[in-house]
Every structure is written in C-alpha cells, then in structure tokens.
Image (tube, rainbow, N blue to C red):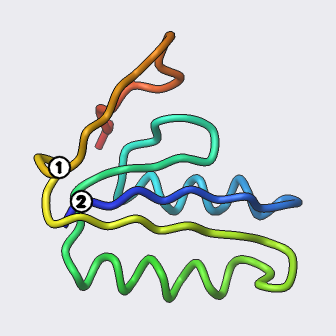
Amino acid sequence: MYCIIVYDISGDVVVKVCHFLRRYMNWIQNSVFEGELTKSQLYEIKTRLKTMINTETDSLLIYTVNSQKELSREQIGTPKRGTDRII
C-alpha cells in the first residue's frame, strides 16, 4: 500500500522520528514522508512511533491508499527533498 505520514512533533524527538522513517519511506518535505509499505512495515512503523512520541502533545497523520496510482499529487514550487534513498 502507498502511505503518507505527516507529523507535528516537538523537541529532540523530531530528529529521531525523521531518521527512523527514512529507513522505510521517502522524505518529501519537513515532517512529510511517503512511500510504498507492506502491512507489516506499516504496523512496525506505527508501533515504534507510538513509543517515540508524546501522544499528549505530538500529532501523527497516516494516509493510506492501495497504490500510488490511486493518488493524485501536484508539486508547486521546488521540492525540498529528492525521492531517492541512499542505501
């Protein structure tokens, strides 16, 4: 499935969340990731992020669609980050 994760997190945890998500997804803009995930990867991401953030003050939004083909995306302006991952 294709997923988009958007977050609003305070403090030093932002860097940890960013590094963690970069293992699975493409970093599109500050606090925005997107990419193709399996159900088990999404479950692992959700489980891990719940332990990293403060659920009282922080916010995560996770959007999922069956495939990227079902999603319309328009870029206006210069992209903040490339969609390639270095392994």
Position in image of residue 39 (x %, y %)? 22, 82
Q: Where's residue 62, x and y in %?
A: 47, 68
Q: Amino acid at mark 2?
A: Tyr
Q: Position of residue 11 (x, y in %)?
A: 88, 60
Q: Residue at x 53, y 47 (%)?
A: 32
- Which numbered disc, 1 or 2, marks the residue that appears first in the sequence? 2
**Tag 1–tag 2 contact (CB < 8 Å):** yes
Quadrant assignment, res 2: bottom left
Q: Nearer the viewer, residue 9 or 21?
A: 9
The one of 70 and 11 positioned closer to us in this rendering: 70
- Above or below residue 26? Residue 66 is below
The answer to whether residue 12 is left or right of residue 5 is: right
Q: Position of residue 75 (x, y in %)?
A: 40, 21
Q: Relative to 22, say whether 47 is above or below.
A: below
Q: Secondary structure at mark 1?
A: helix
Mark 2 crowdedness (10 Å alpha carbons): few <14, some 14-19, many ≥20: some
x 85%, y 85%: residue? 56
Indicate which disc residue 3 carries.
none
Determine the residue located farthest toward the top in the rendered image: 77
- Front residue of this view, candidates 46 and 67: 67
Q: Is residue 61 left or right of residue 87?
A: right
Instruction: Check the image and report above or below for 5 versus 50.
Output: above
Which residue is identified by label 1?
A: 68
Q: Write the residue at 25% across / 85% down.
A: 40
Image quadrant containing the C terminus = top left
Q: Residue at x 52, y 62 (%)?
A: 20
Label 1, label 2: how many angstroms apart (C-alpha)?
6 Å
Circle 2: element type: strand
Q: Amino acid at mark 1?
A: Gln
Label 2 belongs to which residue? 2
